[in-house]
Image (cartoon, coloured by chain):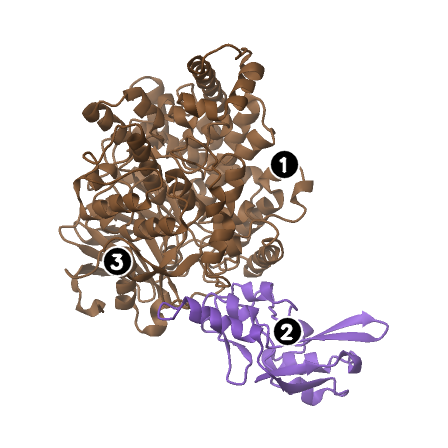
Chain colours: A purple, B brown
């Protein structure tokens, strides 16, 4: 199973509580540019929420040092001690959920901790679980296929 | 077999104080004499930094100071210098992990420079050094170990039972020097292989530990025989360790700008690569069918540029064989990721027959050089030669060009089984080519003879086997003693210059002008060609000063590149480089300044050639196979093209002429054209008609150092 942050754009009113909670939690300041969840104004009172779906795992596949791994609960995590800050993961992320802040050494991303969901006044955010998918398995299949101890 | 460095016999140890790397420079270099086992450091002066920049510039400067005009490749004072450059080691801009290796070449007698990936260079740099000089000759098999975290250099005696071939040696030493399993990626090994013990085609393999594969990969400093120099010094391997690479390990003046510029290119690659060169899926092997389509893919010793069998080794064939979706960069953060591999490849010949291995490559040059050029269209054959070249430490380009020469000699009747010690060298026989490699590794007669390269072989076959000396000279594809790399140059005069008016010998890294010249006809006059043969070699030299790879410059392009003036220069990417240089070094730079940095080092290298007794006009001339059809059947195979040229360009009506006459007329015309090109290029480069930089030009570009002026004046006044 994969734990992830479920977003519901139709409920979002753009109050930015989530970005404040997230950036406070991980960077000790209220700054949307340092939030793992992003809120985009679409005009006419509509908003679009972006956070990692934990499922496509292109970043896991791309990381040259295997600093990006998947936790037991299916969450994509960055191991800062292994990260060389190349930002290849940022480039391959199809929804720009892998984030970086200029001058900070390592990228950052949503790890489905749920802190924002608890504070969201409109219940637009929730931590949920979903099934594994072929995309989610692909990085592990690739690694197994090329392993010198692995089978063809 | 497992090895532990703790059990290696320690011969000497040297420790140093760690200092921070700032703005891309350590401002000091490391000198290791394996003969005396003394280790020392040298400061980098502001003047050296300004004039020579880094990488190949530092390498040439240090090599010049270490050697004399009488120094040859096997003199103890000859060095192997590994230098990185200020931009090298940043993790954000794709292609930023290159080391430049410089040495007096066993093939040419002049400095060779070879650009190579792998983790060694960046680790050496983060360990505190802008360059490493290896000098002297050891009295026993030696391993040099540099620990950049602990600040020490150790010289060990190599254990007698240590494997010699790279795929085993790099693996053994990576495990021997890593602190634990988690430390394996912190170790990089430079080694050669048994083939390099016996051949001036010997190369250096630079390793990178691949966590997914759970093993070492290797990238090659391939050209010019530096592997033989390493083995002649009895150095079995040089090992670097550095743990803790971070985004700002390079000490950039503006790390956020480095991120921004790098990310911009990462994104461009992710979006455009699949529509452009497919480097991420096919690497440089994407060129195979393009070259075959344009009659540029070397076929049968560069006799032809095309064959109906071409598609059998086309890019899509390699894409299926290469493991996909693996981040195959040769340094962290290279999303162009062209360093592909074929995994679990079952070997059919040689000492490792029956084992499954990971084959690094083939890149285009290898697939063409040991594939189509040998008339080998069996991917398995290409992979097998590729693997053995790498593990024996043999350059696939020189090996491919040399073996195709042997196969043509076989076809011409110059060689037979008696003369090859039983090896059948018919076109396409890849097992025969492999046998040459195995014989080379084992030091057997024919393998060692072949490994001396085509310049030697052409003379040898004429003298010993009575071969026609002129034919031998015509079809032995080398310049200055170095085998030509794998593009057909005969239909592009500019590319003949691009290959043979180079400092180190015919290598495609200085200029690749074929499409510009031949297909798009953008540089029709001698002056146009001379300008291209000034600009591109100077521009491309800059990668070697910085520790950069050339490929992310034009193997991926901005989507709107064609709309801009001079799209061949990929102007947006040039601006990326200028911004990147400034972001790292804090020094301002513009486009002209970039070219000037290169021009200084380029002219220094030319002067170095002159100091060693070379660098004459005659040293810049190609064999005729690189310029036009040598044989009648070669002419007839492209008769329509050549007849048309005769009529339109030469102004002679081919009607009624015999093929022999037409071959002669074409030859005379092309040789004359090349002389005119030499005149134009030397003039544009600020050189005399004999190819010597003038003192005035050296002054103008700021390379008027007294020792440089002394050499050029000596040549101009006829003393050198």
Tell me: residue B202, above or below residue B318: above
Query: Which is nearer the eye, A9 or B30?
Result: A9
Nearer the observer: mark 1 or 3; the answer is 3
The residue wearing badge 3 is: B352
Kindly indicate whether the residue at mark 3 contacts the one at mark 1 (C-beta within 8 angstroms).
no
Spatial CA distance of label 1 from label 2 is 41 Å
Q: Marks 3 and 2: same chain?
A: no
* Residue B371 shown left or right of residue B582 in the figure: left
Identify the chain of the residue marked 3, using the numbered disc in the image.
B
Q: Determine the secondary structure under disc 2.
A: helix
x%, y% of residue B323?
46, 61
Residue B584 in view (yes/no): no
Q: Determine the residue located farthest toward the right in the rendered image.
A: A44
The residue wearing badge 1 is: B566
**Quadrant of residue B719 within the rendered picture:** top left
The residue wearing badge 2 is: A34
Q: Determine the secondary structure under disc 3.
A: loop
Tell me: residue B613, above or below residue B205: above
* Residue B181 shown left or right of residue B592 in the figure: left
Q: Residue at x 45, y 70 (%)?
A: A143
Query: Which is nearer the eye, B459 or B652?
Result: B652
Tell me: residue B391, above or below residue A51: above
Kindly indicate whether the residue at mark 2 contacts the one at mark 1 (C-beta within 8 angstroms).
no
x%, y% of residue A90?
59, 66
x%, y% of residue B501?
42, 28
- Which callout, 1 or 3, points at the residue further toward the start of the chain? 3
Few, some or many C-alpha atoms within 10 Å of disc 3 (few <14, some 14-19, many ≥20)? few
Nearer the observer: mark 1 or 2; the answer is 1
Query: Which is nearer the eye, A17 or A54?
Result: A54
x%, y% of residue B244?
41, 68
Q: Residue at x 51, y 10 (%)?
A: B656
């Amino acid at each position: 199973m994969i734990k992830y942050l479920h977003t519901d754009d139709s409920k979002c009113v753009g109050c930015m509580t989530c970005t404040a909670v997230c950036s406070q939690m991980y960077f000790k300041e209220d700054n949307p540019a340092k939030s793992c969840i992003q809120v985009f104004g679409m005009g006419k009172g509509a908003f679009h929420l972006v956070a990692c779906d934990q499922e496509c795992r292109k970043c896991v596949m791309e990381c040259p040092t295997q600093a990006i791994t998947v936790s037991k609960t299916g969450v994509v995590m960055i191991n800062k001690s292994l990260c060389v800050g190349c930002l290849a993961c940022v480039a391959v992320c199809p929804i720009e959920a892998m984030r970086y802040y200029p001058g900070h050494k390592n990228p950052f991303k949503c790890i489905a901790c749920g802190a924002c969901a608890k504070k969201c006044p409109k219940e637009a955010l929730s931590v949920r679980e979903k099934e594994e998918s072929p995309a989610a398995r692909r990085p592990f299949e690739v690694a197994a296929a090329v392993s010198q101890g692995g089978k063809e | 077999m497992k090895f532990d460095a703790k059990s290696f016999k320690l011969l000497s140890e040297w420790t140093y104080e760690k200092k921070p790397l700032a703005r891309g420079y350590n401002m000091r270099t490391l000198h290791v004499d394996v003969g005396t086992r003394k280790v020392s450091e040298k400061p980098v002066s502001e003047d050296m930094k300004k004039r020579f920049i880094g990488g190949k510039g530092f390498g040439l400067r240090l090599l010049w100071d270490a050697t004399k005009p009488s120094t040859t490749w096997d003199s103890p004072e000859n060095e192997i210098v590994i230098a990185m450059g200020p931009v090298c080691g940043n993790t954000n801009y794709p292609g930023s992990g290159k080391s430049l290796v410089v040495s007096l070449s066993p093939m040419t007698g002049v400095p060779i420079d070879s650009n190579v990936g792998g983790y060694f260079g960046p680790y050496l740099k983060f360990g505190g050094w802008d360059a490493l000089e290896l000098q002297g000759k050891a009295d026993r098999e030696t391993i040099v170990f540099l620990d950049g975290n602990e600040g020490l250099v150790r010289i060990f005696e190599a254990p007698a039972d240590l494997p010699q071939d790279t795929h085993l040696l790099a693996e053994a030493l990576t495990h021997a020097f890593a602190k634990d399993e988690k430390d394996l990626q912190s170790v990089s090994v430079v080694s050669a292989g048994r083939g390099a013990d016996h051949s001036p085609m010997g190369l250096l393999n630079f390793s990178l530990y691949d966590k997914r594969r759970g093993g070492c990969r290797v990238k090659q400093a391939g050209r010019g025989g530096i592997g033989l120099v390493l083995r002649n010094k009895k150095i079995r391997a040089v090992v670097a360790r550095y743990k803790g690479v971070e985004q700002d390990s390079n000490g950039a003046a503006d790390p956020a700008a480095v991120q921004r510029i790098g990310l911009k290119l990462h994104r461009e690659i992710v979006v455009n690569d699949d529509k452009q060169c497919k480097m991420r899926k096919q690497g440089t092997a994407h060129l195979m069918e393009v070259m075959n389509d344009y009659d540029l893919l070397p076929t049968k010793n560069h006799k032809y540029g095309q064959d109906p069998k071409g598609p059998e080794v086309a890019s899509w064939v390699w894409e299926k064989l290469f493991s996909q979706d693996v981040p195959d960069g040769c340094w962290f953060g290279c999303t162009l990721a062209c360093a592909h591999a074929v995994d679990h490849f079952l070997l059919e010949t040689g000492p490792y027959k029956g084992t499954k291995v990971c084959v690094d490559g083939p890149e285009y040059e290898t697939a063409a050089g040991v594939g189509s050029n040998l008339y080998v269209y069996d991917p398995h054959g290409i992979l097998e030669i590729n693997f053995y070249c790498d593990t024996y430490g043999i350059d696939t380009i020189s090996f491919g060009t040399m073996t195709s020469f042997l196969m043509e000699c076989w076809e011409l009747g110059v060689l037979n089984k008696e003369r090859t010690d039983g090896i059948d060298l018919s076109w396409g026989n890849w097992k025969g080519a492999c046998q040459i490699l195995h014989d080379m590794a084992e030091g057997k007669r024919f393998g060692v003879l072949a490994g001396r390269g085509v310049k030697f072989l052409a003379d040898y076959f004429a003298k010993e086997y009575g071969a026609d000396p002129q034919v031998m000279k015509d079809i032995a594809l080398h310049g200055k003693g170095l085998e030509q790399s794998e593009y057909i140059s005969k239909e592009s005069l500019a590319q003949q210059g691009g290959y043979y008016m180079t400092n180190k010998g015919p290598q495609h890294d200085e200029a690749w002008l074929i499409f510009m010249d031949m297909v798009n006809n953008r540089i029709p006059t001698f002056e146009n060609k001379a300008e291209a043969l000034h600009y591109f070699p100077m521009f491309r030299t800059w990668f070697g000063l910085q520790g950069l790879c050339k490929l992310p410059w034009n193997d991926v392009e901005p989507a709107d590149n064609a709309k801009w003036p001079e799209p061949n220069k990929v102007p947006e990417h040039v601006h990326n480089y200028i911004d990147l240089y400034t972001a790292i070094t804090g020094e301002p730079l513009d486009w002209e300044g970039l070219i000037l940095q290169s021009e200084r080092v380029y002219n220094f290298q030319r002067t170095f050639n002159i100091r060693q007794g070379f660098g004459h006009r005659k040293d810049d001339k190609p064999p005729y196979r690189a310029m036009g059809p040598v044989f009648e059947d070669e002419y007839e195979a492209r008769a329509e093209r050549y007849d048309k040229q005769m009529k339109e360009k030469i102004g002679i009506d081919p009607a009624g002429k015999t093929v022999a006459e037409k071959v002669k007329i074409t030859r005379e015309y092309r040789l004359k054209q090349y002389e005119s090109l030499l005149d134009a290029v030397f003039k544009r480069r600020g050189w005399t008609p004999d190819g010597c930089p003038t003192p005035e030009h050296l002054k103008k570009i700021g390379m008027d150092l007294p020792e440089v002026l002394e050499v050029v004046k000596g040549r101009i006044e006829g003393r050198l």
